[in-house]
Amino acid sequence: MARMKAMTRREALMLLGSATAAMATRGIAQQVTAGKYSASRESLKSYVTPDWFGDAKFGIWSHWGPQSAVGDGDWYARNMYREGSDQYEYHVKRFGPQSKVGYKDLIKLYTADKWDPEHLMDQYQKAGAKYFFSMGVHHDGFDLWNSKYQPRWNAVASGPKRDVVGEWAAAARKRGMRFGVSEHLSNSFEWLAPSHLADTKGPYAGVPYDGQNPAFADLYHDYSKEPAGYAESIKDNPMGRNEAPDWWKLQYFNRVKDLVDQHQPDLLYTDGGIPFEAFGEGTVAELYNVGPLTPEGKTAAVYFSKTRTDCEVGTCLLDRERGVLNDISPVPWQTDTCIGEWHYKVGAKYKSAKKVIDLLVDIVSKNGNLLLNFPLPASGELDAEEQKTLAGITEWMAVNGEGVFSTRPWKIFGEGPATKVVVKSNGQEFDPNEGKKPDLGAKDIRFTTKGETLYAFVQGWPEGELVIESLALEGPQRPMKAVDVRLLGRDEALRFTHDAKGLRVTMPGAKPATADVGIGLRVRFV
């Protein structure tokens, strides 16, 4: 008792929190659907990546929700409350002060009045996507399915009043595509902290933003039990500390479990590492236990973490947001990126088809997959510039997809100037600025294999003769002797010589239509 009296309030809360966490952990273990996996790291280590993911190579993502409907880009629900930010100023000019018009009032703009998931999925499948992702819930806390634990702020109850996740899932599965969902919820408790503040100057100085109104705590979170000044203390921390009370961690688990149970996705993406110990581990176990199975009865589901240590032994696959590994990984991995901003922004500049294909062949040559977001506006319809990028990808894939899908890496991933870039993070080499690199050219070559066939992607048109030095018969790779070389999409054999210095291929006079984006060669050996 004396020791308890001597404790500070913080120490007492920490002790109580530890006990509560232990009770919560036991509760999570009981709530995970029975199966091979449980809410523990040790259990999840036995996970093995299904072969289908290594075959798929390319997915498309719809990072779409109420924030997209505003049309002013990423993180609007947070930045509109950050006094002095561009989105704060945009909000005041367009909608009025945040104390009168808050994020909750903008959800009605998310109309989806021209959204046709069947038509869009036809386009995405034609472009070569083997899997499709719907956003399930962003940091804004708005659930895009008929959410049991967020009954007021979900896409069926408000906004478009449609089950966005469910309709996307049906459209993808009808076409034989794998279906995934992304959840960005674990950071939400702190990410929305600025909504609990007020202007510090001007005519509304000191007038609380609507996040402080208890009537809307189910959207902006209940801070009533947090220490005084909590929101102010973390207002400038973009992703918060990913700390939260146990009641919020339990809500996180319940909502993600509900999403998984309702839609049984093939893939689940978490925006960060596996959060909140057993609460997060429980969501991974739930995915693996209720998701699809391989013909051998093993889990066919895939969970992504952005934290390398999460995925070192089984458990999950590594996702690099806007980053590319610099060498071949022994296990599959994924880059997720966007042709523009994550949330739709009017007038945004998009990646060209050339930029996307450069990324794709580089990633696939290193045993990775590319997940590409096409941001949708409020209407749910791609704009003209997005259609242009999508059409370019589709045209290239129709000719060169053979060398992408169901392939595996060769002995090395490629050759050329762009192989020289090396950046290290947490002991692993990668390129964190995939969107800022110059386009690859005719000397940049990436390799894939399928059985005994080698594919060489040349990311520009070599005038006259192409030399692939990595195929030197007396070089370190020691390839077999080539007997046939052809351009993908064309039947005629190309003239070539193969010797100690490399493979020299005489290019045809007529360039393929997609040559400026890149060409693919099929090389067969003795």
Image: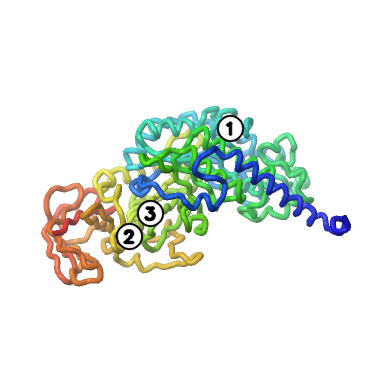
Chain-order first, disc 1 or disc 3: 1
Q: Amino acid at mark 1?
A: Ser
Q: Quadrant of residue 122?
A: top left
Residue 122 in view: yes
Q: Nearer the viewer, residue 185 or 348?
A: 185
Residue at image location 41% in from the left, 49% down from the top: 49
Q: Nearer the viewer, residue 67 or 192?
A: 192
Chain-order first, disc 3 or disc 2: 3
Q: Which mark is residue 147?
A: 1
Q: Amino acid at mark 3?
A: Gly
Residue that carries the numbered disc 3 in the rendered image: 368
Do the numbered discs 3 and 2 sit on residues whose CB atoms are within 8 Å? no
Residue 300 x %, y %: 41, 42
Q: Quadrant of residue 251?
A: top right
Q: Quadrant of the N terminus?
A: bottom right
Residue that carries the numbered disc 2 in the rendered image: 440
